[in-house]
Amino acid sequence: MAVTVNPVNLAAPTVSVPTVTGTLKTGTWQTITTNAFAVAPNTIVSVQFLVNGAPLATVLSAPYTTSWTPLVPGTYSITAIATDSAANATTSAPALGHDHSEHRHPADGQYHEPRARRQPSR
């Protein structure tokens, strides 16, 4: 009887979260979609998303996408941990985003672009 042994590739997966360009202009608690890209010699079995180090969601198959809603203004660090079928895990570099909710209008709570200051007339 012949036995076939398939060696496990011990190379860790690679994972990245696209850099957040600009700012997270969430207005009044709008939902933000976050993506991760993960590849490995073995099968990716999960990608866990973290926001400021706290678990947000675990996605078990591609596309590795989740949605979340920031509840307070501030800077958010978004990372992902990819785990493959050989239990190898890699954490992405953080993608940073800043919720500029401090630009909310005090009367209506809605996001408004900061206005340019007018030059005094002479």
Image: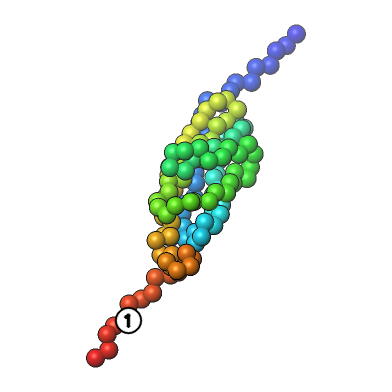
Relative to 2, 29 lies left or right? left
Residue toward you, 24 or 20: 24
Vertical arrangement, residue 89 with respect to residue 95, above or below? above
Q: Residues within 10 Å of mark 1 (few under 14, many from 20)?
A: few
Residue that lies at the very extreme toward the left in this rendered image? 122
**Which three-letter amino acid code belongs to the residue tagged 1?**
Arg
Residue toward you, 46 or 52: 52
On the image, the x and y values in percent for residue 46 come to 59, 34
In the picture, the quarter occupied by the N terminus is top right
Which residue is located at x 38 percent, y 74 percent? 115
Q: Is residue 55 visible?
A: yes
Residue toward you, 25 or 88: 25
Query: Residue 120 is drawn in which quadrant?
Result: bottom left
Relative to 52, 11 lies left or right? right
Vertical arrangement, residue 87 with respect to residue 62, above or below? above
Which residue is located at x 60 percent, y 39 percent? 59
Residue toward you, 81 or 11: 81
Residue that lies at the very extreme toward the right in this rendered image? 1
Residue that lies at the very extreme toward the top in this rendered image? 1
On the image, the x and y values in percent for residue 28 come to 51, 60
How many numbered marks does the figure carry?
1
Relative to 31, 19 lies left or right? left
Which residue is located at x 40 percent, y 52 percent? 74
Vertical arrangement, residue 91 with respect to residue 66, above or below? above
Q: Is residue 39 visible?
A: no
Local SS, label 1: loop
Which residue is disc 1 drawn over?
118
Residue that lies at the very extreme toward the front in this rendered image? 107
In the picture, the quarter occupied by the C terminus is bottom left
On the image, the x and y values in percent for residue 17 come to 49, 46
